[in-house]
Amino acid sequence: SQQGEEDPQALSIQEGENATMNCSYKTSINNLQWYRQNSGRGLVHLILIRSNEREKHSGRLRVTLDTSKKSSSLLITASRAADTASYFCATETGFGNEKLTFGTGTRLTIIP
Amino acid sequence: DAGVTQSPTHLIKTRGQQVTLRCSPKSGHDTVSWYQQALGQGPQFIFQYYEEEERQRGNFPDRFSGHQFPNYSSELNVNALLLGDSALYLCASSLLSSEQFFGPGTRLTVL
């Protein structure tokens, strides 16, 4: 079963705008990770945030985590056409190398 | 340094047949996990292999089985294929306590 859900399910924005995706989950976690998937192929790891962290940055990506609300957000700033993809959050509940439980994904389309 | 590789890329089978999918982990990784991703859904965990043993298993029937070899590569076997087994099968490798790196996947179509 899916651990969480991404919101929105689909998002279309103009190139250069910022894109925000949200993820909610159900159980306590050790960490939360965001992945990108292009055209139904393999997943690319974007960023990992641990349960004791509240915010993390990587290039144009900013991730926040609110464990009290069991939610996370992914912000992509200054979007590019190449950012068009599906984005998934995944939670890990164990301590080290445990299974990942994925959400349902957000389909992001960047309009040139 | 090669990343995670999977073979074949695509596969077409008929109901009732058996299939074997293969995965070679990223160099230096010792743990392999398998996921099933149905169209329009997020990946779902099938099982994980470490030191040639199944370490964790998701909610999948016994028709799904696997193996890990001494060189850490892995196979996923599915018996008595059903139409609902049509999906993208993803392999991920990792080193204990590290992030998982995914391969490009094998697209299985069951007719």
Image: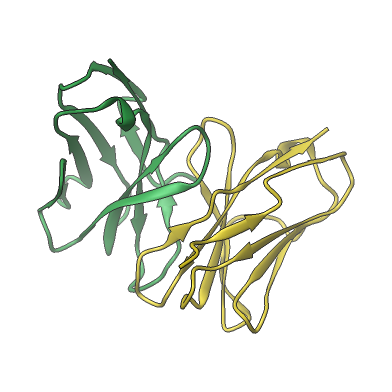
Chain colours: A green, B yellow
The picture places residue B33, in percent across and down from the top left corner, at 54, 64
Quarter of image, res A72: top left
Residue at image point 48% right, 62% down = B3
Looking at the picture, does residue B66 appear above or below residue A17? Answer: below
Q: Tell me the quarter of the image containing the C terminus of chain B.
A: top right
Looking at the image, the residue that sits furthest to the front is B1
Q: Is residue A34 left or right of residue A104?
A: left
Residue at image point 58% right, 59% down = B5
The picture places residue B96, in percent across and down from the top left corner, at 40, 77
Looking at the picture, does residue A80 appear above or below residue A67? Answer: above
Residue at image point 24% right, 32% down = A21
Looking at the picture, does residue A85 appear above or below residue A36? Answer: above
The picture places residue A68, in percent across and down from the top left corner, at 14, 50
Taking depth in this image into account, of B2 and A38 the one nearest to the observer is B2
Residue at image point 30% right, 53% down = A33
Looking at the image, the residue that sits furthest to the left is A54
